Image: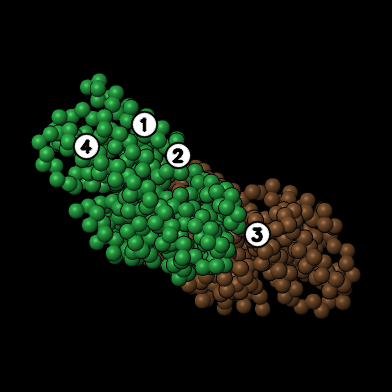
Chain colours: A green, B brown
């Protein structure tokens, strides 16, 4: 039992170290690196036991960082490494195969952001005014690529309470010499008549083709629809998650609130939710490393991933 | 009464009764100005009253002060001023001024009486920022022994929503403060939306605290009724077609307008909600649809 706690403690430590080392890395990627390391150090005797401990490790990491992507990324990692012939007699050889596949998976997803940026930046025309929400590293990457292609555009970014993450985004954009204006969350409807397109990131992409993202995304999508502005989502494929919410309440609480809030607070209805669900009818296109998808095409791709 | 005294009197009125609408305080100030004015002609009097209204708009840039002042001027002039003696004309104007003031002091109560019946027992209400009219309506509904709960937005940048929440807690109404960003999230849980207005425009749309427009769009998307409560002195002679048409002097606080050079860096304090998103307006002239507002407005300003 001691072993269990010590190993989980080390797991969390390793995960945190990974996040600190490269703040630009997606938390899901850090989680997958951690799981790969866990796999290498695991001393289990059976494949089934290995799978169970990996699932346990993923749950543990979700307890640290309650974003949807950590949960989906972990599950996809597990499926990918098991998706091979494990008919070897020797357990260590099976493990070696799994580790190799794990490294392959990690390499693939490390390139996903670049692929998304390559697909999306062409949709940003010269002179465009873009609206985005909160801080998203994928959107930042897309805008970096567009700026590198010598396109002139300006950005409105929402402040995004309660953590004012939008200001971080604004600072990052100023470093790229992109004209940026921080607007209040309440000013989204006000500013939409001035913008040409809306680009947001996603914390998770659900089966229906809708997305889970920072609170405020849903009303941005509703207002964009009302103003007939294209609403684009940029997300890597490891964010595709096996959920099918029909409304805001269907999203599990474990994703809605920060991990520490879930542990300490008794009455969750007093807390501000950190995310909301945007239905597929409000999304124009999703840019992923699997290609440019319409929301309806997402279910097909998701099934292929999880098969 | 010079500008400084005017501003001082206005500020004193606001301090004396924080529950009073700023437009009512402005009208009291204009009445006092009228009493103390030493002009020799009616035309001169009108010009100085207009000047005084502009001065007060420079202190408190809400739409209601501007519209209230203009309506006051029209109301007091809307009488036979064919007396030989200027002082008698002034007396008539002062009497009408007092009458106007009395009428508008009762307008909030009239609005509350009309609106509270639309709040059913067990209703969940969403409201935006701090509005004394909405507060009055909810007080009346609570006094009628109705049980309802309220979601109020925090309303950045001044967090006025928290003030509203505190006032509602004193009435023992269950209240939850939500983020401005959480309006779309919370709308599926509510039954109706009630907001105040800083100004009601000719088209039947409203000008109110920033965030009202997106609340209206989301309410429409969720098919929830969107009610506006406003007194009639807030009816203003503007016809904006979009957000940009609203004059800058209303969009930003008075001190911001004076000190800041580049207004595009500032957060606007208000936005415009078009009439297509509003279900009903509750005013002291009655319960109006947005299209009926133009008729009432014309009658007021004739």
Are the residues flagged by discs 2 and 3 in contact, CB closer than 8 Å? no
Measuring 14% from the left and 33% from the top, which residue is drawn there? A91
Q: Earlier in the sequence, mark 4 or mark 2?
A: 2
The chain holding disc 1 is A
State whether discs 4 and 2 lie on one chain.
Answer: yes
Image coords of residue A1 (percent x, y): 22, 22
Q: Position of residue A72 (x, y in %)?
A: 29, 47
Q: Earlier in the sequence, mark 4 or mark 1?
A: 1
Residue labelled with disc 1: A14
Q: Which residue is mark 2?
A: A22
Which is more foreground, mark 4 or mark 2? 4
Q: Residues within 10 Å of mark 4 (few under 14, many from 20)?
A: few
CA separation in Å, label 1 and label 3: 46 Å
User: How far separated are the C-alphas under marks 2 and 3?
Assistant: 36 Å
Give neighbour class at mark 1: few <14, some 14-19, many 20+ (Cα, 10 Å): some
Q: Which residue is mark 4?
A: A96
- Please, which chain is the residue tagged with disc 3 on? B
Question: Residue B59 in the image: x percent, y percent?
Answer: 73, 56
What's the mark number on residue A298?
Answer: none
Question: Label 4: chain?
Answer: A
Closer to the camera, B300 or A73?
A73
Pointers 1 and 3 in contact (CB under 8 A)? Answer: no
Q: Are marks 2 and 3 on the same chain?
A: no
Labels 4, 1: front one: 4
Determine the residue positioned at 51% across, 68% down. Answer: A125
Q: Is residue A159 visible?
A: yes
């Amino acid at each position: 039992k001691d072993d269990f706690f010590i190993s989980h403690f080390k797991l969390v430590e390793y995960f945190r170290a990974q996040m600190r080392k490269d703040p630009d890395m997606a938390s899901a990627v850090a989680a997958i690196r951690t799981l790969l390391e866990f796999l290498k150090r695991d001393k289990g005797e059976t494949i089934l036991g290995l799978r169970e401990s990996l699932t346990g490790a993923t749950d543990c990491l979700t307890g640290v960082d309650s974003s949807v992507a950590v949960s989906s990324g972990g599950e996809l990692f597990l499926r990918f490494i098991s998706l091979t012939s494990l008919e070897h007699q020797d357990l260590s050889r099976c493990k070696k195969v799994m580790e190799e596949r794990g490294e392959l998976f990690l390499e693939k997803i490390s390139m996903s952001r670049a692929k998304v940026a390559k697909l999306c930046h062409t949709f940003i025309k010269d002179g465009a005014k873009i609206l985005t929400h909160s801080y998203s590293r994928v959107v930042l990457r897309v805008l970096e690529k567009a700026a590198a292609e010598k396109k002139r555009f300006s950005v409105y970014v929402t402040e995004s309470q309660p953590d004012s993450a939008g200001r971080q985004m604004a600072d990052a954009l100023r470093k790229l010499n992109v004209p940026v204006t921080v607007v209040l969350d309440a000013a989204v409807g006000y500013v939409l008549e001035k913008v040409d397109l809306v680009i947001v990131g996603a914390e998770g992409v659900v089966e229906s083709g809708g997305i889970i993202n920072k609170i405020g995304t849903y009303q941005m999508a509703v207002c964009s629809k009302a103003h007939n502005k294209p609403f684009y989502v940029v997300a890597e494929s490891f964010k595709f998650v096996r959920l099918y919410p029909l409304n805001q309440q269907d999203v599990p609480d474990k994703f809605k609130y920060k991990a520490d809030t879930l542990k300490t607070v008794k009455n969750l209805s007093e807390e501000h939710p950190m995310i909301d669900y945007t239905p597929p009818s409000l999304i124009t296109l999703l840019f992923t490393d699997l290609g440019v998808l319409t929301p309806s095409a997402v279910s097909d791709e998701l099934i292929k991933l999880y098969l």
